[in-house]
Amino acid sequence: MDERLTALFEVLIFVFTIVAVFAVIDIVVAYPYASWLKKSMMIILAVSIIMVKRKYREYGLLPSKARLSIKWSFIILLVFILPAALPLIILGVVIEWFSMLLNFIWFMVFVGFAEEIAFRGYIQSRLNESFIKTYESFMGFKVRWHEGTLIAGGLIFGPIHLFNAINFRTGEVNIDIALILIVVFASFLGILLGVIREVSGGIIVCSTLHGIIDYVAVVLLKRGVGGAFYWIPLAISFFVFFSFVFERFIIDFSEKN
């Protein structure tokens, strides 16, 4: 019990440090520079702690099964980009390639990698050192994962999105149904990404999935397509992912182990 409380204490200190740093940056730095600086600081804080602990591979800083992770990252990119690209082509949406590329870098590095090295790299790894209870399936798929992953994804990664309701410059708080839905989805996604992190042994694949989901949802669909049904291509991607990709991904990494 003492070890689990120590792990929770360390993780919560890290989380509140990130929130405090984000709040200060939002107050003193103008948009859009604040966003880039906040995620850069998240990377620096997570990497610094991992380096202090000297657990580079255990906490995901060094790649594990790099070739296999790159293979599955490429597959995931295709699964989520192709259904989103089709409506753009059909609707004849004018593509600003430089903006698309800049946004791709932002979401893959400063959203996907930044949040994964923090939440699945440090936080999840630290909790799984102490919360060692295991589960044998996830959404009906036979895969072993740990209690620390559940805590990191469902109880920390999801709820931390509630801070998006706070305007640190003005002190205003705005919680609406859209934000609640985002928190619920983020909690589920946090657990999914955590399971992927455990299966693959690193953060390459979960960083790719995290980044491309946000990129497709925000840039290709919401901004590019718009409308009430912009989410349909993303739903198709998730259907394909869980129907044809996820199980094969688990088996592939299990066979290599």
Image (tube, rainbow, N blue to C red):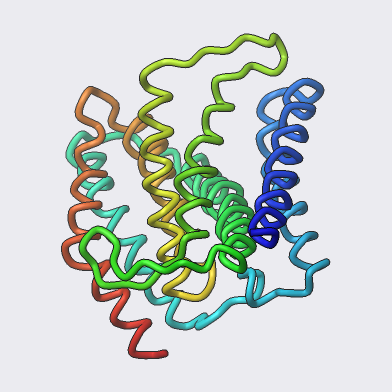
User: Residue at coordinates 61% horizontally, 65% vertically from top-left?
Assistant: 130
Residue 207's x, y, as percent? 50, 59
In front here: 99 or 147? 147
In front here: 202 or 106? 202
Relative height, residue 159 to residue 51 (above, below): above
Q: Residue furthest bottom?
A: 256
Relative height, residue 216 to residue 118 (above, below): above
Q: Quadrant of residue 34?
A: top right
How many numbered circles does the render carry? 0
User: Residue at coordinates 56% horizontally, 36% vertically from top-left?
Assistant: 160
Residue 9's x, y, as percent? 71, 49
Relative height, residue 31 to residue 14 (above, below): above
Looking at the figure, which quarter contains the N terminus?
Answer: bottom right
In front here: 116 or 222? 116
Relative height, residue 84 to residue 241 (above, below): above
Residue 33's x, y, as percent? 71, 32
Residue 76's x, y, as percent? 34, 63
Q: Quadrant of residue 21?
A: top right
User: Residue at coordinates 26% horizontally, 72% vertically from top-left?
Assistant: 142
Left or right: 106 in relation to 34: left
User: Residue at coordinates 36% horizontally, 66% vertically from top-left?
Assistant: 135
Looking at the figure, which quarter contains the C terminus?
Answer: bottom left
